[in-house]
DNA sequence: AACGTGCTCAACCGCTGGAGC
DNA sequence: CGCTCCAGCGGTTGAGCACGT
């Protein structure tokens, strides 16, 4: 486990598995009347034999008003593909660009359909540049560029934190996502390698290593600055 | 009709970040 | 500062369904 304690809903007291219509209706009614300020207390207050986490998931993915059911449109699928290329598997971020779709739905449609379709099209054309960014997509280049800027800011924050020379300097995953699956051309500069600078006692050599890392990343960041999607 | 296989998607699990004490 | 607690996220699982043989 990470921070915090083990979930308390693993006792034999709670129901698991598919939700019945009755349970769903109970939860919907309760939340519509009382809101959802504390998921943990909801099952007890609503009279459900479920854990709070399960209630939250049921509400977010199924009961919440405005949820779109049914097949994804071509435009939605294109949007998912484009955002996945730009952001990686940030399903909640991608979902925020598709009103009415949940991160779970998007994750499912990606894992079961879009990923395979993309793989197929790549292997059939065998051309990296074959993925076109058509104008019918719901995602604009501004959206992708703004996400890209966020990634750059985060990258810089990571680097500043690592200046303390105590932690590992890792290639930020966020940057790698931009070039995942080779759908966006790789930068003409080599990808920075993660570097270990554990517990350097010598401040000078520590500084030199950090500078080298910064050089690598600034070259990458310059490359990103000059790209338009 | 019976069986095997693949697909879909709701739900679960483990982990993380952040707030509060 | 360290611990507990909670919400949220992404990966994984498995029941149920569709389809082919």
Image (cartoon, coloured by chain):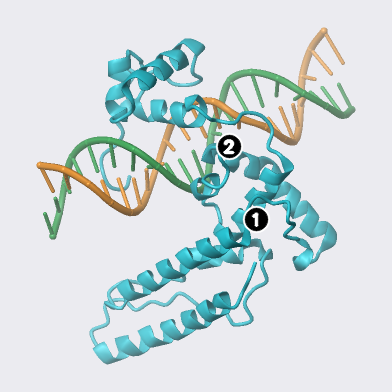
Chain colours: A cyan, B orange, C green
- Give the letter of the chain under mark 2: A
In depth, the one of A97 and A215 nearer the eye is A97
From the viewer's perspective, is residue A128 above or below residue A84? Answer: below
- In terms of secondary structure, where does tag 1 sit? helix
> Which residue in the protein does label 1 denote?
A82
**What's the mark number on residue A191?**
none
Asked if residue A90 lies left or right of residue A47, the reply is: right
Asked if residue A178 lies left or right of residue A159, the reply is: right
* Pointer 2 with pointer 1, Cβ within 8 A: no
Q: Residue A42 is drawn in which quadrant? A: top left
From the viewer's perspective, is residue C18 above or below residue A220? Answer: above
In depth, the one of C11 and A51 nearer the eye is A51
Give the mark toward the camera: 2 or 1. 1
Question: What whole-number distance in Å separates the C-alpha atoms at marks 2 and 1?
Answer: 16 Å
> Which residue in the protein does label 2 denote?
A105
Residue C17 image offset from top left, x and y in percent: 70, 20
Asked if residue A27 lies left or right of residue A81, the reply is: left
Residue shown at the point (40%, 25%) measured from the top left? A55
Residue shown at the point (40%, 73%) measured from the top left? A156
Q: Residue A161 is drawn in which quadrant? A: bottom left
Query: Which callout, 2 or 1, points at the residue further toward the start of the chain?
Result: 1
Asked if residue A30 lies left or right of residue B4, the reply is: left
Residue A229 image offset from top left, x and y in percent: 65, 66
- In terms of secondary structure, where does tag 2 sit? helix
Residue shown at the point (41%, 13%) measured from the top left? A26
Residue A92 image offset from top left, x and y in percent: 49, 46
């Amino acid at each position: 486990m990470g921070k915090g304690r083990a979930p308390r809903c693993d006792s034999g007291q709670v129901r698991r598995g598919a939700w019945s219509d009755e349970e769903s209706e109970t939860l919907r009614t309760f939340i519509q009347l009382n809101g959802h300020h504390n998921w943990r207390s909801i099952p007890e207050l609503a009279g459900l034999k479920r854990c709070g986490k399960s209630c939250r998931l049921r509400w977010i993915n199924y009961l919440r008003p405005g949820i779109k059911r049914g097949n994804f449109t071509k435009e939605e699928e294109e949007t998912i593909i484009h955002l996945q290329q730009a952001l990686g598997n940030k399903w909640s971020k991608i979902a925020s660009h598709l009103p009415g779709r949940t991160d779970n739905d998007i994750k499912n449609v990606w894992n079961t359909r879009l990923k395979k379709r993309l793989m197929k099209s790549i292997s059939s054309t065998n051309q990296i540049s074959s993925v076109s960014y058509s104008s019918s997509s719901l995602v604009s280049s501004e959206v992708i560029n703004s996400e890209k800027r966020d990634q750059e800011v985060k990258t810089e924050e990571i680097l500043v934190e690592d200046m303390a020379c105590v932690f590992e300097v890792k290639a930020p995953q966020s940057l790698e996502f931009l070039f995942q699956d080779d759908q966006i051309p790789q930068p003409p500069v080599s990808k920075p390698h993660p570097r270990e600078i554990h517990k350097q006692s010598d401040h000078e050599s520590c500084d030199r290593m950090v500078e080298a890392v910064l050089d690598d990343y600034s070259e990458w960041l310059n490359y990103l600055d000059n790209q338009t999607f």
